[in-house]
Image (cartoon, rainbow, N blue to C red):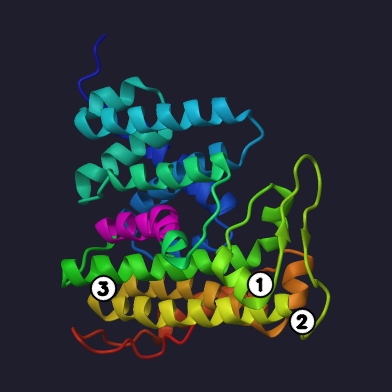
């Protein structure tokens, strides 16, 4: 029997699967996504589930050539999803693709932005490093700005052009925070993200692991050494991107602004912990306790206040 469209039960099950993935694996984003009304929450969970799948390919243990092949297959599947029908999505039997196709039929989700995420993951797999901040900024826009633009398709906005640029800037801020959080872990995986020009400016050296090693950072463990100064410098840069990106909030409806404010608030609070204790951040991956994340999310929802075009979102102070 040919299926003309996925059964409602199939789509519902697909969304439930995506929401489960989000709850279990989106350690920071889940708090914000939970603040959305049901239709937007389900749609954004579908976006996250596919983004997570793409990230997992790039961060997995497969050989480089196989990772690149799987990322290429993901790009092909996305092209087919964007051009196909609900029946085509159902025929894949893939709950994430089924849910994402349905989400894109309900909201103007720019599925092409996943291609930028894949581009960034391909750079990770190749072990690309960055000489300048402009080069790193392009990478950040690929892997995080793309998620901002995908999310904006679900949220909607009063001023789409301005909102897209601001979502992109917020993505840069979030990714810079990730990079500072994961310096040690990335070295162990053979990756260096901090720009060579900044390392040279502070007289620092990051030595990525070659095989099954931990990697090394020059001067680590010194509270006032060059590595700590570099972390503080990059944290300052990230703050400036948050200051720009958070201007997105007044352009969103109340629940979407609360979602964005919660996610950004959690990351910005994490950034402040890293900046306050850079040597701890270099020694191990830092994170916020669940209770602190929940308080930030609750504050974002209850304190968002009335959002006015061109105004500020009262109560959101990540």
Is 295 positioned to the left or the right of 188 in the image?
A: left
Question: Viewer-proximal residue, 141 or 249?
Answer: 141
Q: What numbered label is drawn on residue 199? A: none
Q: CA distance from mark 2 to mark 3?
A: 42 Å
Q: Judge the density around disc 1: few (<14), some (14-19), many (≥20) Cα neighbours within 10 Å.
A: some
* Mark found first going from the N terminus, 3 or 1: 3
Instruction: Where is residue 80? Give x, y as percent.
Output: 27, 27
Q: Earlier in the sequence, mark 2 or mark 3?
A: 2
Crowding at mark 3 (Cα within 10 Å: few <14, some 14-19, many 20+): many
Span highlighted in magenta in the image: 138-154
Disc 3, disc 1: CB below 8 Å? Answer: no
Which disc, if any, is residue 225?
A: 2
In the image, residue 214 sits, relative to residue 313, either above or below, namely above
Camera-near label (2 vs 1) is: 2
Secondary structure beneath dot 3 equals loop
- The residue singled out by tag 3 in the image is 252
Q: Which residue is mark 1?
A: 288
Q: Position of residue 121 (x, y in %)?
A: 49, 44
| In the foreground, 154 or 122 | 122
CA distance separating discs 2 and 1: 25 Å
Secondary structure mainly formed by the magenta segment:
helix
Visible residue check, residue 34: no
Q: CA distance from mark 3 to mark 1?
A: 26 Å
Residue 33 drawn at (x, y percent): 43, 62
* Residue drawn at 53 percent across, 77 percent down: 268
Q: Nearer the viewer, mark 2 or mark 3?
A: 2
**Which one is in front, 212 or 133?**
133
Badge 2: how crowded within 10 Å, few (<14), some, or many (20+)?
some
Q: Residue at x 25, y 18 (%)?
A: 3
Position of residue 231 relative to residue 112, above or below, is below
Most foreground residue, 234 or 86:
234
């Amino acid at each position: 029997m040919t299926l003309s469209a996925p059964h409602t039960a199939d789509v519902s099950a697909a969304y439930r699967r995506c929401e489960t993935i989000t709850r279990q694996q989106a350690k920071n984003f889940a708090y914000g996504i939970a603040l959305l009304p049901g239709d937007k929450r389900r749609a954004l969970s579908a976006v996250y589930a596919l983004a997570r799948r793409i990230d997992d390919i790039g961060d997995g243990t497969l050989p480089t050539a196989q990772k690149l092949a799987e990322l290429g297959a993901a790009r092909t599947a996305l092209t087919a999803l964007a051009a196909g029908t609900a029946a085509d999505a159902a025929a894949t039997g893939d709950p994430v693709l089924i849910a994402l196709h349905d989400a894109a039929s309900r909201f103007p989700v720019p599925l092409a932005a996943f291609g930028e995420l894949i581009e960034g993951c391909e750079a990770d797999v190749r072990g690309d490093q960055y000489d300048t901040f402009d080069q790193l900024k392009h990478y950040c826009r690929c892997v995080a700005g793309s998620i901002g633009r995908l999310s904006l398709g679900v949220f909607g906005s009063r001023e789409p052009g301005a909102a897209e640029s601001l979502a992109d800037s917020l993505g840069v801020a979030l990714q810079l925070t990730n990079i500072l959080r994961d310096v040690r872990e990335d070295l162990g995986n053979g990756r260096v993200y901090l720009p060579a020009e900044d390392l040279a400016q502070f007289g620092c050296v990051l030595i990525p692991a070659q095989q099954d090693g931990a990697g090394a950072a020059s001067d680590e463990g010194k509270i006032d050494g060059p590595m700590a100064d570099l972390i503080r410098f990059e944290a300052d840069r990230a703050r400036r991107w948050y200051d720009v990106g958070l201007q997105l909030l007044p352009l969103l409806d109340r629940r979407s602004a609360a979602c964005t404010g919660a996610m950004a608030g959690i990351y910005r609070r994490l950034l402040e912990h890293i900046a306050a204790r850079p040597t701890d951040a270099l020694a191990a991956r830092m994170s916020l306790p669940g209770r602190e994340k929940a308080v930030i999310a609750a504050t974002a929802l209850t304190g968002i206040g009335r959002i006015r075009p061109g105004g500020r979102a009262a109560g959101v102070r990540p």
